[in-house]
Amino acid sequence: MSVDAAATSDATDPAWSAALLQLERAATTLKLDRGLLEMLSVPRRAVEVAVPIRLDSGATTTFVGYRVQHSLTRGPGKGGLRYHPDASLGQTKALAMLMTWKCALVEIPFGGAKGAVRCDPGKLSIGELERMTRRYASEITPVIGPGRDILAPDINTGEREMAWVMDTYSTVAGHPVGASVTGKPVVVGGSRERRRATGIGVAECVRLSARRAGLAEPVDVVVAGYGNVGRTVAESLAEDDSFRIVGVSDLSGARYAPEGLSPRALASHVDAGAELAEFPGGEPVDREDLLTMACDVLVPAAVGGVVHAGNAARVRAKVIVEGANAPLTTGADDELCARGVEVVPDVLANAGGVIASYFEWAQDLQAMVWADEEVTRGTLAKLGSAFDEVAGASERLGVGLRDAALCLGVQRVAETHLARGLYP
Ligand code: NAD
């Protein structure tokens, strides 16, 4: 297999262009100095590495990996590692930049980073995945670590991969370094609450935005993408009589019930190994159609770009809370906002995960273990403050929640740059 050209080029990457455009918009609203804008437009460091591995067949193949540290101004880099055939340098740069604004917005002492290996993990055996993860980790070891850049799970990576990264890093260091990654298994210093933190945070944003929009109870919620995040959202909201989960979907299909579905029964059904589409409650609908079914709040919690120019006009939700990263295309976002639909942006809505990661890192650094409730309480407190600040900035600046959130994040990073000064 030869390394493809798209893997090593980012000039025309749409994700990177969109990220730059977002920054430009925030800079214009903030009347940011052009020199500072230029500085924020270039990642602090972007590393591209070869990841050669021996396959089970005995042949060798080489993947391309990236680690981008967009900003190290407010603290070490922080961001996930994804395995995906479409991963590119431009996409990784864009996601790293988003992490910078997200960490600044929720006031945790991190910069923004992201990593990726361009591969199809479904085609690799567990042994091959482990060799790839360890080789990638060893290639980026000089630029990562508890004080430099801390990795976390992202698409197609999880606790298992984080344990491999931590073990590889620790082997080089000669002692265990738990704080080199977050989202690792509890037995190696991971945090139980990290697993649920993103979903719990998204559910909290559903509560806060429903109250802000004055939605009548019970508030009907559709969760599109019943994975780690979506399932936690459904289960968390089900604890509250004010909310009703009327629709859920995953890759197998969708179910819709205006009178409400039971998240507990749904969880038992899926845990027993059955497909969500076969759940004996509500009616089966196409997973694309679920996005436009009647509801008060839509939580897209699967993949990016599911609400687009082709279906935005048919979306009936009054509020959208972005559980996934970038589930709305820019055009759809503009159209929905113009229609008065309140969109709680990803940078705020799914920040619960990175806040809990910060607590995991802090516990590892101090060799302390906090109670689960302490982590949840701390996560919700930080998220709640950020929500209020974004709502306030939206009114003060006369912009939507997304632009307000980005303005707050960009402004904080800019202020830190100015306070630290420019070397030399
Ligand atoms: P996951 O893999 O556990 O779940 C994704 C779910 O979406 C799966 O059930 C899958 O079947 C479903 N799905 C995929 N394509 C779909 C489609 N077109 N329509 C409906 N369902 C579809 O992933 P996750 O960890 O829950 O993450 C979901 C999203 O949240 C991702 O965009 C991720 O980047 C974002 N996110 C996750 C975290 C986290 O801590 N897990 C943090 C921040 C952001």
Image (cartoon, grey):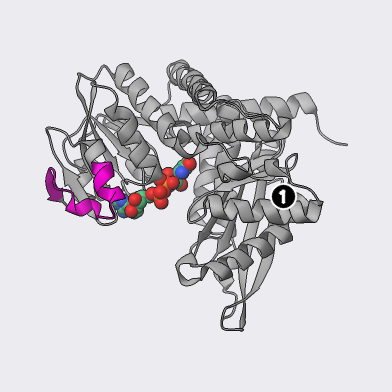
Tell me, yes or no, whether the highlighted magenta stretch contains residue 176. Answer: no
For the question of whether residue 175 can be seen, the reply is: yes
- Residue beneath the point at 67% across and 51% down: 166
- Residue 410 location in percent, x, y? 59, 31
Q: Nearer the viewer, residue 43 or 54?
A: 54
Q: Answer left or right for 62 relative to 153.
A: right
Figure quadrant of the C terminus: top right
Q: Nearer the viewer, residue 369 or 203?
A: 369
The local secondary structure at tag 1 comes to strand
Q: Nearer the viewer, residue 99 or 122?
A: 122
In the rendered structure, which amino acid carries the disc numbered 1? Arg
- Residue 178 location in percent, x, y? 68, 43
Residue assigned mark 1: 45
Total number of numbered labels?
1
Q: Residues within 10 Å of mark 1 (few under 14, many from 20)?
A: some
* Location of residue 141 by image quarter: bottom right
- Residue beneath the point at 31% across and 17% down: 211
Q: Which residues are magenta?
A: 266-284
